Image (cartoon, helix red, strand yellow):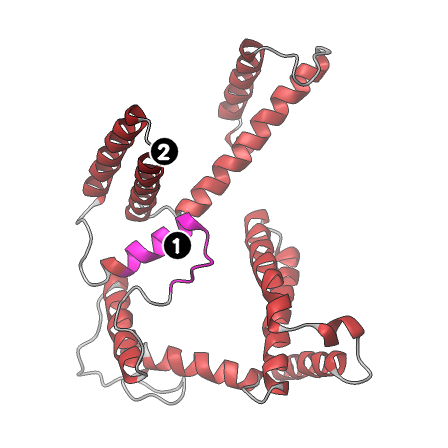
């Protein structure tokens, strides 16, 4: 524990020096607004490192993401609002208060234990329902909105946001009992999109397409498949197969734009067949 504390103190000291009078001109110029894109970029790089399965890359990318937290906390400290310790304390208090089945209802330390006679949650679904109920009470006490949908960032990618919104709604029972209902909704929305396309009304087509994407994201949630990750996998597959098409055309001396759709379809089917023989590259 002492080693970890020393490592954190070292990082905070480095950040303070970089922001100090004798620090780095670039670091001193940054604001919370200018740092916004880096938070997203570093988050996605962590996800790529997880997908890559390289522990060293994962460790490094987590460090880059931690830097963004330390950076913002330092700016807030300079402005007299809060510091890194306050950030750590806030999440610690939240974890203690929202896990009464682990730490007890009035826990103040990670060593606390609940009353063995008190009723507890039995499974993950129960934990999520309890979390939502506690969060709702906390928000009401702070004078915030009472909707269970609060806390889902508008900046999330659309599919991921749809997943989180429907997951939050499900915590109070607004959900189908199984994936069959969600699948039927996808079919319903697809039919309505077909009708909109037939009408030629662009606004209606956009509306129905959004409904279909939302219903598909909800079905993915019911199947236990993160829709954003599923799409990322499909994009990687598309890139791999399309590059195979480009390489095939190049081997035949066919320039971009000169190939027929039939030629490209044949190469695409070859790439698809190869990926089925070796799923790891699909």
Pick the front one: 105 or 236: 236
Quadrant housing the N terminus: bottom right
**Span of residues in magenta:** 152-168
- Using residue 270 as the reference point, say whether residue 161 is left or right of it: left
* Percent coordinates x, y for residue 189 in the rendering: 25, 36
Q: Is residue 4 visible from the viewing direction of this image?
A: no
Residue 118 in percent (x, y) is at: 18, 82
Q: Is residue 159 magenta?
A: yes
Magenta region includes residue 233: no
Question: Relative to 39, does residue 231 appear above or below in the rendering?
Answer: above
Principal secondary structure, stretch drawn in magenta: helix
Mark 2 → mark 1, Cα distance in angstroms = 24 Å
Q: Nearer the viewer, residue 243 or 197?
A: 197
At 62% from the left and 62% from the top, the residue drawn is 38
Q: Residue at x 33, y 34 (%)?
A: 205
Helix or strand or loop: what does disc 1 sit on?
A: helix
Question: Residue at 38% of width from left, 90% of height from top?
Answer: 108
Q: Which mark is residue 161?
A: 1
**Residue 176 drawn at (x, y percent):** 18, 49
Q: Residue at x 35, y 52 (%)?
A: 163
Horizontal side of residue 260 vs 149, given as left or right:
right
| Quadrant hosting residue 219 | top left
């Amino acid at each position: 524990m002492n080693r970890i504390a020393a490592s954190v103190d070292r990082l905070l000291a480095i950040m303070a020096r970089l922001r100090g009078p004798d620090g780095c001109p670039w670091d001193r110029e940054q604001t919370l607004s200018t740092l916004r894109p880096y938070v997203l970029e570093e988050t996605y790089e962590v996800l790529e490192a997880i997908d890559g399965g390289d522990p060293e890359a994962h460790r490094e990318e987590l460090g880059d993401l931690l830097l963004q937290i330390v950076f913002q906390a330092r700016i807030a400290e300079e402005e007299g609002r809060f510091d890194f310790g306050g950030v750590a304390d806030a999440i610690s208090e939240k974890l203690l208060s929202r896990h009464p089945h682990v730490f007890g209802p009035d826990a103040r330390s990670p060593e606390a234990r609940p009353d063995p006679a008190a009723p507890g949650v039995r499974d993950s679904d129960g934990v999520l329902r309890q979390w939502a109920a506690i969060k709702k009470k906390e928000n009401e006490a702070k004078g915030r909105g009472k909707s269970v949908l609060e806390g889902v960032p508008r900046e999330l990618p659309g599919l991921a946001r749809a997943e989180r919104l429907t997951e939050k709604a499900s915590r109070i029972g607004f959900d189908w009992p199984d994936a069959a209902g969600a699948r039927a909704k996808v079919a319903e929305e697809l039919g309505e999109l077909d009708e909109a396309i037939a009408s030629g009304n662009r606004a209606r087509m956009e509306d129905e397409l959004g409904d279909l994407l939302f219903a598909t994201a909800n079905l993915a949630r019911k199947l236990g498949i993160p829709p954003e990750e599923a799409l990322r996998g499909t994009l990687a597959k598309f890139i791999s197969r399309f590059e195979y098409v480009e390489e095939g055309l190049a081997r035949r001396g066919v320039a971009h734009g000169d190939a027929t759709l039939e030629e490209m379809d044949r190469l695409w089917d070859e790439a698809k067949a190869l990926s089925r023989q070796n799923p790891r590259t699909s």
